[in-house]
Image (spheres, rainbow, N blue to C red):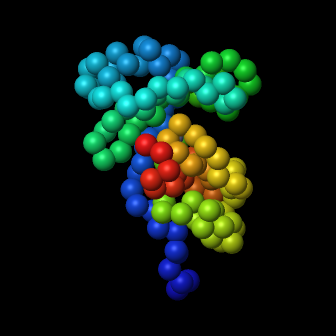
């Protein structure tokens, strides 16, 4: 057996869902399900309007493309609305990225960056059997 992986995953921090309209999606996620809106933000540089809804011990992140040739816009165009990524919480994102890289995991973000939910980085879905995974550092944001 290989030695134990040091990348400590604490929990699923949030699940990212691409929607055509955050405003319309509130009709189900906020109003019908009764989930509390934690924050909403427009991230111009990423071409996305994002909203975070409280699920108790994790969150739902709604992502709406707001123009431009972004990954989220392409996703909506080619695959429609739906599940986009899973975000896992780690204690130390730099340590986790360094260790995953050492193990040959392909990274989208070599360096952590600031996102809606804190200090984040994406791993390449090819490394994760087709699932886009985001890491977020514990205590760095929401
Ligand atoms: Zn996310």
Taking the spot 42% from the left edge, 48% from the top edge, the residue there is 13
Q: Is residue 34 left or right of residue 11?
A: left
Picture coordinates of residue 90, whole percent (x, y): 48, 60
Q: How many marks?
A: 0
Decide: is 138 above or below 47.
below
Which residue occupies the foreground of this view, 129 or 23? 23
- 62 to the left or right of 2: left
- Viewer-closest of 104 and 91: 91
Counting from the top left corner in percent of width and height, residue 121 is at: 61, 50
Residue furthest to the front in view is 140
Residue displayed at 52% across by 75% down: 5
Residue appearing at x 48%, y 37% in the figure: 16
Residue 100 seen anywhere in this rendered image of the structure: no
Looking at the image, residue 32 sits to the left or right of residue 58; the answer is left
Residue 9 lies in what quarter of the image? bottom left
Residue at 44% x, 14% y is 23
Residue 33 appears in view: yes
Image quadrant holding the C terminus, namely top left
Residue 133 position in % (x across, y down): 55, 50
Residue 98 in the image: above or below residue 114: below
**Where does the image place residue 94, in percent across and percent down from the top left?**
62, 62
């Amino acid at each position: 057996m290989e030695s134990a992986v040091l990348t400590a995953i604490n929990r699923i921090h949030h699940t990212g869902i691409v929607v055509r309209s955050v405003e319309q999606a509130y009709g189900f996620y906020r109003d019908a399900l009764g989930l509390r809106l934690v924050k909403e933000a427009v991230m111009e540089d990423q071409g996305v309007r994002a909203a975070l809804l409280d699920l108790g011990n994790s969150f739902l992140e709604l992502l709406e493309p707001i123009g431009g040739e972004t990954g989220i816009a392409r996703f909506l165009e080619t695959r429609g609305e739906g599940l986009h990524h899973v975000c896992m919480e780690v204690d130390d994102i730099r340590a986790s990225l360094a260790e995953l890289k050492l193990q040959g995991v392909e990274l989208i973000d070599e360096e952590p960056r600031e996102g809606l939910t804190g200090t984040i980085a994406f791993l390449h879905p090819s490394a994760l059997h087709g699932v886009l995974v985001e890491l977020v550092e514990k205590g760095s944001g929401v």
